[in-house]
């Protein structure tokens, strides 16, 4: 069955999922999870372009994988906001909000090229991570399925349920007893005060605004019992239900 892609528009929120090719793991070590997070930061926030004298050998604080895509540092910062994410052993979940559906880059010949923000972001994310994953784990070939799954989440009520589902995914998979015990999602950003000096990859403003900007209220929501009606809402956005295995 062909994958139907939604239309992308300013302010639109999208749940995106991709899993390992042939159901293989996409993360084999903590370093792999950290690499993926660094690439998210590289694309969505950006790293300082100049060398940091505090770092060993004065090396710039860029993920090694930037060599696979050297022109993307902060490219998507004006285009997309990451609202939630969770990295699982053989798949990942992202909840993205579009700020601008079309981005632009300057071509080597000086011409301006345009691209669709969401598909281009996922393409660069998966290719760059695969480059690092293969290098680290001494393997070759595809890491992710070629066709990621995506669903538009059209209203605030549903966005909240999808964020809850993303953050409790490790509990559903019986990897941990509580969502805060899983180290490879951004749930901790929502429930732990963050220093103003630290710029997180995730923009928490939208989701926390529904809870009076109170992290404890969001934590209570995520950990609370899911009603039958809420379960039906979540079910609409489980993009690959039969394949979400650990």
Image (cartoon, rainbow, N blue to C red):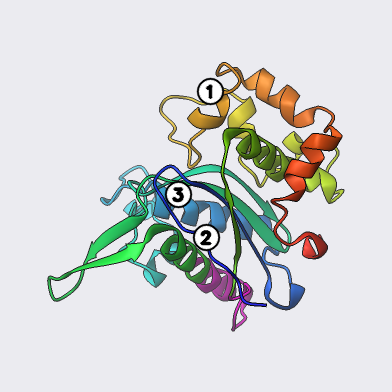
| 3 vs 1, front mark | 1
173 w.r.t. 207: above or below: below
Q: CA distance from mark 2 to mark 1?
A: 26 Å
Task: Please report the residue visible at 42 percent of the width from the left and 65 percent of the height from the top.
Answer: 120
Of marks 2 and 1, which one's residue comes earlier in the chain? 2
Above or below residue 166? Residue 62 is below
Residue at the bottom extreme?
A: 140
x and y, in percent, of residue 122 in the image: 49, 63
Looking at the image, tell me whether mark 3 or mark 1 is earlier in sequence order: 3
Magenta stretch containing residue 138, yes or no? Answer: yes
In terms of depth relative to the viewer, which is nearer, 177 or 205? 205
Q: Which residue is mark 1?
A: 209
Query: Which of the 4 image quarters holds residue 192?
Result: top right
- Residue closer to the observer: 84 or 192: 84
Q: Secondary structure at mark 1?
A: helix
Label 3 residue SS: helix
Magenta stretch: residue 108 in it?
A: no
Disc 2 is placed on an element classified as loop
Q: Which mark is residue 41?
A: 3
- Measured in 3D between alpha carbons, the distance from the residue under mark 2 to the one under mark 3, in whole angstroms, is 25 Å
Q: Which residues are magenta?
A: 128-146
The structure residue drawn at horizontal position 64% and vertical position 44%, both measured from the top left corner, is 185
- In the rendered image, the quadrant that contains the C terminus is bottom right
For label 2, count other residues whose C-alpha is less than 10 Å away and answer few (under 14), some (14-19) or many (20+).
few
Q: Which residue is mark 2?
A: 6
Specify few, some or many for label 3: CA neighbours under 10 Å numbering under 14, 14-19, or 20 or more.
many
Separation of marks 3 and 1 at Cα, in angstroms? 23 Å
Residue at x 65% of width, y 57% of height: 92
């Amino acid at each position: 069955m062909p994958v139907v892609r939604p239309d992308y528009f300013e302010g639109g929120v999208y749940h995106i999922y991709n899993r390992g090719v042939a159901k293989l793991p996409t993360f084999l070590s903590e370093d792999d999870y950290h690499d993926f997070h660094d690439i998210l930061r590289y694309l969505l926030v950006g790293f300082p372009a100049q060398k940091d004298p505090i770092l060993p050998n004065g090396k710039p604080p860029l993920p090694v994988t930037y060599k696979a895509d050297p022109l993307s540092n902060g490219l998507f910062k004006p285009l997309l906001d990451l609202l939630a994410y969770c990295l699982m052993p053989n798949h990942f979940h992202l909840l993205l909000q579009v700020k601008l559906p079309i981005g632009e880059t300057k071509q080597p010949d000086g011409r301006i090229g345009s691209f669709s923000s969401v598909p281009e972001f996922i393409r660069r994310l998966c290719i760059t991570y695969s480059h690092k994953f293969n290098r680290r784990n001494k393997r070759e070939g595809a890491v992710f399925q070629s066709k990621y799954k995506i669903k538009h989440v059209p209203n605030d009520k549903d966005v909240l349920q999808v964020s809850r589902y993303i953050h409790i995914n490790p509990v559903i998979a019986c990897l941990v007893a509580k969502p805060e015990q899983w180290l490879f999602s951004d749930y901790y950003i929502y429930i732990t005060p963050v220093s103003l000096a630290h710029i997180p990859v995730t923009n928490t403003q939208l989701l926390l605004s529904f809870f009076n900007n109170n992290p404890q209220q969001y934590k209570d929501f995520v950990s609370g019992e899911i009603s039958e009606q809420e379960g039906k809402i979540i079910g609409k956005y489980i993009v690959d239900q039969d394949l979400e295995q650990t």
